Amino acid sequence: MSFLRIKAMARKEWIQIRRDRLSLAMAFALPAMLLIIYAYAITFDVDNILTVVYDQDKSSTSRDLIARFAESKYFSIVASIDSYRDIDQYLDSGKAKVAITIPFDFSKNLHIGRPAPLEVVIDGSESNTATIAQGYIAGIAEAFNQHQSIVPVAPVIDLRNRVWYNPELKSRNFLIPGLIAIIMSVIIALLISLAVSREWDRGTMEQLISTPVKPVEIVIGKLAPYFVVGFADTVMSVLIATLVLRVPLRGSVPFLFLVSAIFLFGGLCFGLLISIGARNQLTASQIAMLTSFLPSFLLSGFVFTISNMPAVLQGFTYLVSARYFVSVLKGVFLKAVGFHVLETEVIFLALYGLAIFLLAVKRLRKRIE
Amino acid sequence: MFERIWYLAVKEFIETFRLRRRVFFIFVAPVIQLFMFGYVATMDVNNVSTAWLDFDKSKESRELSRRLEASGYFTIVARPASSKEIAPLVDGGTVLLAIEVNRDFSKDIKKGRPAQLQVIVDGTDSNTALIAMNYVNQIVTTYATDIGVPIEARAAPADFRQRIWYNPDLKSRNYFLPGVIALIVMLTCLMLTSMAVVRERETGTMEQLMVTPIRPLELMLGKTMTPALVGFIDMLMVTMAGVLWFHVPIKGSLPFLFLSTGVYLLSVLGIGLLLSTLSKTQQQAMMASFFFFQPAILLSGFATPIESMPRIFQYITYVSPLRYFLVIVRGIFLKGVGFSVLWPQVLALFVLGMLIFLFSALRFKKRLE
């Protein structure tokens, strides 16, 4: 292995990257765009649930109850209706997700001490919103009942909830750290998948082979400049996440970047492996997209909890390197944990990178010969 | 004129299905995506790994832990002996939830004092945390009611009877899978259309086509027929797999689903043509499709409700054909509603599709001349 040849190779590649302005612009614009969209538009926080009220009772008690819904930020009352038919209409068309019916004898029942039923219809098609709405309704119901009871009753069980790491339960804090892993996987795979297939396409591979440069030197030389671009991308994403989007970064920053570097190396080697095997640039980027985006999005635990998946798919997740990086990112950002907790993940990432690197070198050697 | 369009369409049809790779992309990739989404994309919260720290070890605390596990929402995976052991369990992600029962839990219950129960939740995954907390609340409240003071002694409470419509089991699969139709039809057709046009340009056969008497509009129609057909087939495939394999209910009318898919395709094919005028190579066309697709899904209400987005993003969703089509497919599948309820969406989709198609037709014509 000669350092000089690697350097020359890297320099040639660097010039090529710089010439491809479009891809380079994409490498930086896309992460920024995705981070912003995810941070602002994708939220699992449920508020402003569209609600209609059918108040048959029209008493001060029922108005007090409705006010409780209106004042909580979770519900927004879009209309008062006066027939059951309207409930159908509002829910069918999606103009409301919750309909509350307060019957004629509601306040009368409460005053004479009889249980006063009232009916809440929830649109279950958005199952997640519906589940959370149920919880909020239960909360309002409890507060209302406490207020209504003449003699204050001490609760039988005093339940105290404490939320760690993300006390306001903001979904942004949950999504953004993991998203960095997804973005990196896709960008890296797309960029580098063209690196070798381009040479096949243009026939310059023959020229490369006729020089004294060795396969391992080609691989390292090709990797180096993309590594720089990828690392710059990571730094940019972390900066956007913390400074613009205000996601807390509680753990060690050097550790974060160290693991990012290991992950980058593995991702780049994987892209290179695709690129070596592909016949042309089109095939290379098609394969890169298919193998990087779907698995890292669905099987990394980024949004969808791995322990909820069927066993076969859970097995697959162990092969997705983003899985390890996602848990490192979430751990460092939110839990402030370091190597002693995340050592398995880091070791896996390192081994994965090394294995793919050796495979890429072997594959290239075979294709050249 | 029809003859010319027909000949071109036949040529396109043959060309599209000649490559085995493309056939794979058209028919197998959607099935893989559907299965991944069907099995992975679930926000349902089950089997939350729980640590149970019981200082009381009484009949009461055992009953509570039994109820937690019997609910199916919680699995007790650790029984630490001291509070100090909780932090490592939560940090390392072994448990998501830890419940600590005070030494005097049963004594307090018997004496009628509020018995303390401490719950610690890992808030990293905000959605799961919130739902898990709600479940604990429900279970504890039910338990407290069961063991607590007899009902007559308490002030009569307002009894909220919740009913869930459309998706009574609150399965997130029923919410996601109909949306996957919109997703797959868009991704497949977008790429097919944009690449079909660019392919001619890349291989230089565009000139040959232009010396034939075919007119730009005829060329456009001929080029979009095969993708449209594929769109319908993919829609049908995903629907069948969803209904037969995943048992997603389809309550509405199938002909209406066909009709609205047709209207939806108008926009999708229009966008595909538009992207083809922007790209020089097939690879660029593919990238462009992918990068259009990303924000298009995120800003459509596919994963999260539009009402929770900030105002400005809500406005952007109005120009997304996905937004309207998602309401339509979910309406057909889950709510069983038809044209009488969904006509605003169909109309919006039609107008949007016509505008997009006209705009890209103009651009397309200009590019050709």
Image (cartoon, coloured by chain):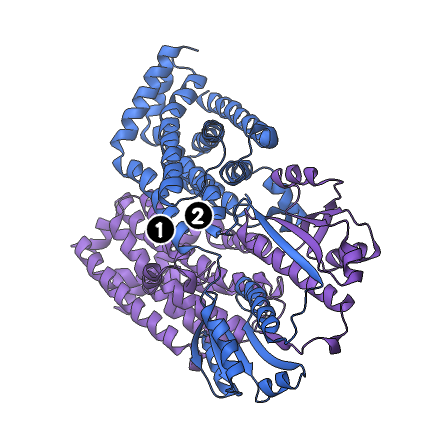
Chain colours: A blue, B purple
Q: Pointer 2: what residue?
A: B19
Write down the residue under mark 1: B289
Q: Is residue B350 above or below residue B306?
A: below
In the foreground, B269 or A153: A153
In the image, B50: left or right of A231?
right
* In the depicted structure, whether residue B15 falls above or below residue A80: above
Residue displayed at 46% across by 72% down: A70
**Residue B24 visible, this orientation:** yes
Give the foreground label among 2 and 1: 1
Circle 2 SS class: loop
Residue A215 in which image quadrant: top left
Read off the chain for label 1: B
| Residue A182 % position (x, y) | 46, 42
Residue B141 locus on image (x, y percent): 69, 64
State how far apart marks 2 and 1 are (Cα).
20 Å
Question: As rendered, which of A126 and B239 lies closer to the eye?
Answer: A126
Q: What amino acid is at disc 1?
A: Ser
Residue at the right extreme, as displayed: B59
Residue B72: % across, % down? 71, 58
Q: Amino acid at mark 2?
A: Leu
